[in-house]
Amino acid sequence: MRVVFLHIPKTAGQSVHAALEAAFEPSVICPARVNDQLRPMSIAELNRYQVFSGHFDWCLLDCLKGPSYRFTILRDPMERILSFYFFLRKQGEALSPQERAKPQHTGMRAAAEMSPNEYFLAGPPHLRNFLNDHYDNFYTYYFAGRTYRGRTGLIGLQNRGLISRTQLMDMARANLAELDRVFTVDEMPAVFQTIRDLAMPGRSVPEREFRNNVNDGLPVASRVQRLRELGASDETMACIASWCEMDNELYALYRQRLGGPAA
């Protein structure tokens, strides 16, 4: 059986990938971790691998043959956005001015050098496109469109009245239901147990919890306070809240399954 992990940024995915590496031989794990590494592969080449783990457009993996176990992990939407922002800011601040100026570090440079108001509300078009695609109700647009640029593909239909908010949410919920499991970050022990159950014979996942690429353990309230201390205005906070509106509804479905409070 194939294993497909659809890794949403800042949802403990590095820890999950490390567990998958422990559970499967390197030769069966697809080396691609992002779309640009996946796209050059032919259908035949993709089907040589058993495990896929990365920031992938889900639709790029439709060509996989045979049964598969497909899963993802969700996190409180506001917490995910702020964690993503502070991760990029921290990474950017750690770079030298020369490294920060390189094109591949544009996002880190923007987070490190711009004020929160500039970053979330202004900035050049390429930054706005990045924020729209990765922050604005990402769960909803990703699972409805099954691509990282789901918002780009669907917002025009919304603006022309060809798809309603209700229809968009219904698409996202229906597509999420096609996955074998949707975990939340509160269920990491269950995630690792699932990987143990799927592991190749002779491979094992340690009992310890993997904690790779964790920037900090601050609760969302502390991150909001930190953003305010950096100068975030009410308008900026309202913008971020709007980017969580639909995603909060999706996240609440899976939090309620655990008996937790709605987002």
Image (tube, rainbow, N blue to C red):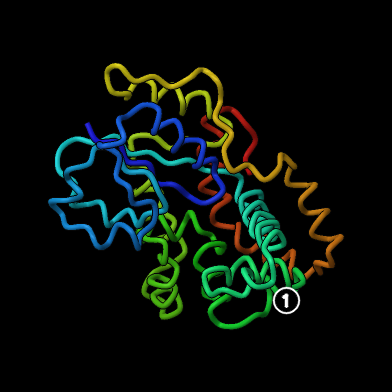
Image location (x, y in percent) of residue 191: 46, 28
Q: Is residue 239 above or below residue 31?
A: below
- The residue depicted at 22 percent of the width and 52 percent of the height is 62
Name the quadrant containing residue 92.
bottom right
Residue sticking out furthest to the right: 229
Name the quadrant containing residue 186.
top right
Image location (x, y in percent) of residue 8: 48, 50
- The residue depicted at 48 percent of the width and 24 percent of the height is 190
Q: Is residue 224 left or right of residue 39?
A: right
Looking at the rendered image, the quarter that the C terminus falls into is top right
Image location (x, y in percent) of residue 180: 33, 35
Query: Which of the pair 258/109 is nearer the observer?
Result: 109
Considering the numbered disc 1 on the image, is that residue within a helix, a strand or a loop?
helix
Mark 1 residue type: Glu
Q: Which residue is under mark 1?
A: 118
Name the quadrant containing residue 143.
bottom left
Q: Is residue 101 above or below residue 241?
A: below
